Image: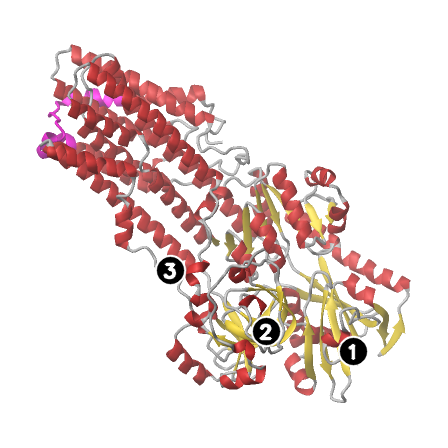
Amino acid sequence: MKSKQLKLNETTWYKLSVHDCVANLSSSLTHGLSTEVVRELQKKNGLNKVEKGKRKSSFDILLSQFKSPLIIVLVVAGIITFLLDEWADTLVIYLVVGLNAGIGFYQERRAETAFEKISEGETKEAVVLRDGKRSRVDESDIVVGDIVYLSAGDYVPADCRIVESHGLQVNESMLTGEWVSVSKDKDTISKKTALSERKNMIYMGTLVSSGEGIAIVCETGHATELGHIATLLIRADRIETNFEKSITSLAKMLTGVIASAIVLIFLVGVYRGEEMVDLFMLSIAVAVAAIPSGLPVVVTVVLAVGLENLLREGGLVKNLLAAETLGSTTVVLTDKTGTLTKAEMLVKDVILPHGNDDRESESVLEAAVLAADGLIEEKGETKKEIVVTGHPIERAIIIAGIESGIHREEILKRETLLERLPFTPERRYRASLVAKQNGSVFLYALGAPESVLAHSDSYMKNGEPVKMLSSHRQDILAEVERGASKGMLFVAVALKKVKEHSFDQFGEKKEPLARGIFLGLIGLHDPVRESVPMALRVAQDAGVRVVMVTGDHAGTAGEIAQIAGIVGHKGEVLTGEMVEKLADEKLGEKIRTASVFARVLPEQKLRILQTLQGQGEIVAMTGDGVNDAPALVHADIGIAPDSGTSVAKEASDLILLDGSFSVIVSAIKEGRRILDNLKKSVAFLLSTGFSELAIVGGALLLGLPLPILPTQILWANVVEEGFMSVAYAFEPAEPDIMKRSPRGAEMKSILTQDLKKLIGMLAFITGIISIFLYILLLNTGMGIDTVRTIMFALLSLDAIFFSFSIKNLHIPIWRENFWNNRYLLFAFVMSILALALALLLPPLQNLLSLSALSTAEFLIILCMGLMNLLVIEIGKKILFPRKQNMLE
């Protein structure tokens, strides 16, 4: 891939040796910076931040309300009516424009606030050396001269010069466009070199893909390469989701239909001799009323409210449209640790290869503590509170060591830690080189039993190595199998006396642990979260299939899956090795029934994901590691726990703030609620608009006078859409929402066939009843202004009544709970108030050409509205049986 051509920062830190860099930055590799120096540098240089761009101001949001083509048409219409001295029409038009702008401004500002809450919900941290101790600090507090510790999955917090590299590889694609990770080392580069070739430098915002390293910060904030090229780092336009495409397609279809209807209305009106001004205004009014111009605002509000609801449940959604996809999820690929379990590994047992011995058990635990790489910090005012962070297994081992009186930091005051070898999926163990006081060097290894045993040719017994036979290996692995069947996880511990003082000295072909001495097994247990079995039952009742995909032992995976409720007794477990051997067709067959996959590598997880997607499934997938990122990106919904690596969280759409699977189920429920409410809003907007088209078009085709004037349609539009449609955003989930089957990948349109029937039925019924009433009133000799007033009131009241009928589409209106959405009740009150003001307030009566109505006429309107509602309810019962949900 061709690299992006960037204007590079002209600093030359890569030309300096490590010693010169440290000296220039007045730092220390052994003590780092002092707290006082850090404060001074923060005052001088500011925080380590690169601004992501100016947020939309309130004025920008307000201005954007007037950019809609429909609003522009209205503004032009207002100018024309003003020039024609139609003052009343001009006033009503601009009143409508103002109200629409006000509602849109309020809702978009609300959505902006929701985004701000989300962006504030996550901060990045880095491990630095200060005052001689390693500590975790906020990335924004990093200063030049800080010594930074990096491992796989970390974001580089600033521009840094490499000090030490242990297999360190960095993905610099955000700067160079190259997706292949770059190996890093500390060697000085003498000549001027392009950014992509600076092997001894790492840059802010890039990702550590593997290995570990130590670096010194050279530039922060806007002085970094990222700061210099911030304008080039804006993400590419995202691809439209099926939902967005369906909205766009819907808008195009409506534009064509309504444009045709308006042309027909205009031609018939001209043929009948109607005034051109009236026809022009009527055409514009019908267009604004019929096209759901409020739909973009409604969609934004529904999604934003859903986002806030999910945030309260413990899920942080990074993308509004991801919320919609959650409701369509058919399969959840979940990992085990931290999602189904508590991610609180506890050391339960130490198993020796020859029986019990407390002294040797302590030796095994000490070796494991030296091999582990968790960060140990002293916190609290008295510095007596010990906090251990790092991988759950290593954290558990270090804590178990501390509880047994084995303190790594105390040991390393007597002995010297030379170097660490990070864990990789290929190696499947991590190791440390430690020099004893007598000068001898030992390698301590901690990892998967199969891998450690494969490299060990002896085991320790009574302090002496004994040759390991094949039968010994089989017995140890059998113990692992027995423990795994009970939900235990085992890691193996080994040591080896070596001559090398760094892992680089082993060379590429020599295995560091070859001919090692096996010390024993450490058994750990990670209990299933209490909330998981119930959450899984809810997901399964909702038709969502849950599949566990883990790197753990098959026995452990099977036991946890059984406890959680994913499978019954002795459910089938497929291993990554089996997946690798299966052809695509056979894998597809297996995946239809298998619900547990163990010992799975990241590339195998991606293959499982893509196979499911190829079968038409909408897949949500969890992952917490760097190597999970490709699958998280390819998933329909990528999910990462808050404790996951930075790259996993960046690749995800949903972040679990407490890591629990129950949050995923809550997210699916919220996604379905969002889909329901979007469909209700669209159905409401289209139904009211098409009803107006049917009435006006029907009257013109029958040669009757206009049943409702343009200004009246515009006001009715405010009454109907301005309040009622947005209120659906706050509609709670229907009782059976998690008893339905998922929507499925093939459902690409927001308008189901049943909803189309409902909209057509409503427009037809309202049109027939209204035209019938209109003809009846005209034949009584009633004045045209009074008749139009009755029609205006009836249309408005029909829309208000229908908003409650559509509240729950599969139960009759008299069984609905009206009190569970106070926003809809508020919208009802405001709509009735707006209608009452138009009918009773003389200035508005004159403005809208309305007449005062008698009590009898009000009763006619109410009776006709209730009759219309009853007919709609009968239609609901006939078209949609009560057990069938119309939104599916």
574 or 583, nearer to the observer: 583
Q: CA distance from mark 1 to mark 3?
A: 60 Å
Mark 1 or 2: in front is 2
Dot label at residue 200: 2
Density class for disc 1 (Cα within 10 Å; few <14, some 14-19, many ≥20) is few
Nearer to the camera, 542 or 21: 21
Question: Is residue 346 shown in magenta?
Answer: no
Q: Percent position (x, y) of residue 680? A: 39, 33
Closer to us: 64 or 410: 64
Q: Which is in the foreground here, disc 2 or disc 3?
A: 2
Q: CA distance from mark 1 to mark 2?
A: 45 Å
The prevailing secondary structure element of the residues shown in magenta is helix
Res. 53 mark: 3
- Number of labelled discs? 3
Tell me the amino acid under the disc marked 2: Asn
The residue segment tinted magenta is 838-865
* Mark found first going from the N terminus, 1 or 3: 3
Q: Given the current orientation, which residue lies at the most extreme front position?
A: 191
| Marking on residue 359 | 1
Residue 388 is situated, as x and y percent measured from the top left of the image, at 59, 72
Q: Earlier in the sequence, mark 2 or mark 3?
A: 3
User: How far, Cα to Cα, is label 2 from label 3?
Assistant: 30 Å
Which residue shows up at 78% across the image and 63% down it?
A: 451
Q: Is residue 167 left or right of residue 328?
A: right
Name which residue type carries label 3. Answer: Gly
Residue beneath the point at 66% across and 54% down: 602
Taking 392 as reference, is 863 left or right? left
Q: Residue at x 38, y 25 (%)?
A: 759
